[in-house]
Image (cartoon, rainbow, N blue to C red):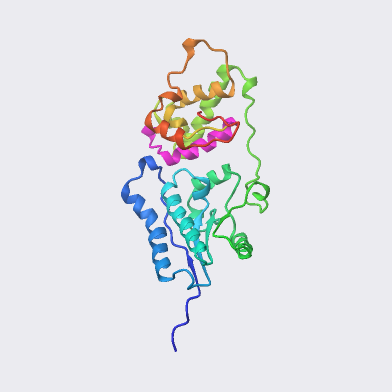
Amino acid sequence: MGAVPIRGVVHGAGITDAELFTELDEGRLRRTVWPKIAGAQVLHQAFPPGSLDFMFLTAAAGAVFGVPGQGAYAAANAYLDGLAQLRHRQGCHTVSQDWVAWRGLAFGAEAQIALQELERLGSRAISADEAFAAWDHLARYDVAQAVMAPMAANAATDGSGADEPRAATPAWSEMPAEDVRAELQTGLRAILARELHLAETDLDLDRPFAEYGLNSVMAMSVRRDTELFVGIELSATMLFNYPTIVALAEHLAKKVSPQPESESDNDALGDSDGGVLSDLFDSVESAPAGSERGI
């Protein structure tokens, strides 16, 4: 008797590597995209359209939403989206499933920055039970691509902690200017110490963040915690344009509690001096209406 024919395929290979494009080298790029792209190419050739009952490609919602540090991974998953569209047009039941992280499993157990960014977008990680229920629901539709992500209306219905109360934002506008700066310096120091695993007393207010080993991916986590602390949305270039606690606190003070200032008070560290990296971020970052774009 011959082997049982293969009637369906699930492509689930993948490697992720948190690194911003400005710091990504060719070797790391290839290592990240190869399992997704090369694996999909092999399966596409081995099982051409019409030879299977189904093909499911395990992609990622980060390719749709955009998650800092996951550019290479998003590119690889975008390839799966394109391949699914091609096979679907040729009459094959191929679906690219753009998943958020599965809570506590594989990528979802390690990618804290990605999880935080998903939360910023109103989503969250999902449980395995939720994932399989969504997968079963998807089987009812003839589509080539589906974003498998819980959004704002049901983002915190499972006790995952997404709706836990957060600390109240200080009433900045009611505080004297000196108190605002002092409070910001204290809060920023605590945030950075937590991310760098250092004692707060070990952080010099005037020492550049880079000298403590803060990298671009860690900066995303600091940015998120700072947003929660100050109560406004911040840009990806913030820590590069204002690279010390003193400089950053001074800049944020002008945002959270604007004070009358003369022309002589203009900040020499304005965003226009961010350099090539700042220009790059400004060109690709899209902020929602009403956000503090350019901070």
Tell me: residue 269, above or below residue 220.
above
Viewer-proximal residue among 106 and 29:
29
Asked whether, in this view, residue 230 is left or right of residue 241, the answer is right
Question: What residue range appears in magenta?
Answer: 210-232
Asked whether, in this view, residue 125 is left or right of residue 46, the answer is right
Where is residue 224? Give x, y as percent. 53, 38
Residue lying at 39% horizontally and 54% vertically, measured from the top left: 33
- The answer to whether residue 149 of the structure is visible from this angle is yes
Task: Please name the predominant secondary structure of the magenta segment in the image.
Answer: helix
Q: Quadrant of residue 231?
A: top right
Where is residue 168? Give x, y as percent. 64, 33
Viewer-proximal residue among 7 and 275:
7
Where is residue 1? Give x, y as percent. 44, 89
Q: Quadrant of residue 227?
A: top right
Residue lying at 58% horizontally and 43% vertically, measured from the top left: 121
Farthest residue, direction bottom: 1
Number of residue marks = 0
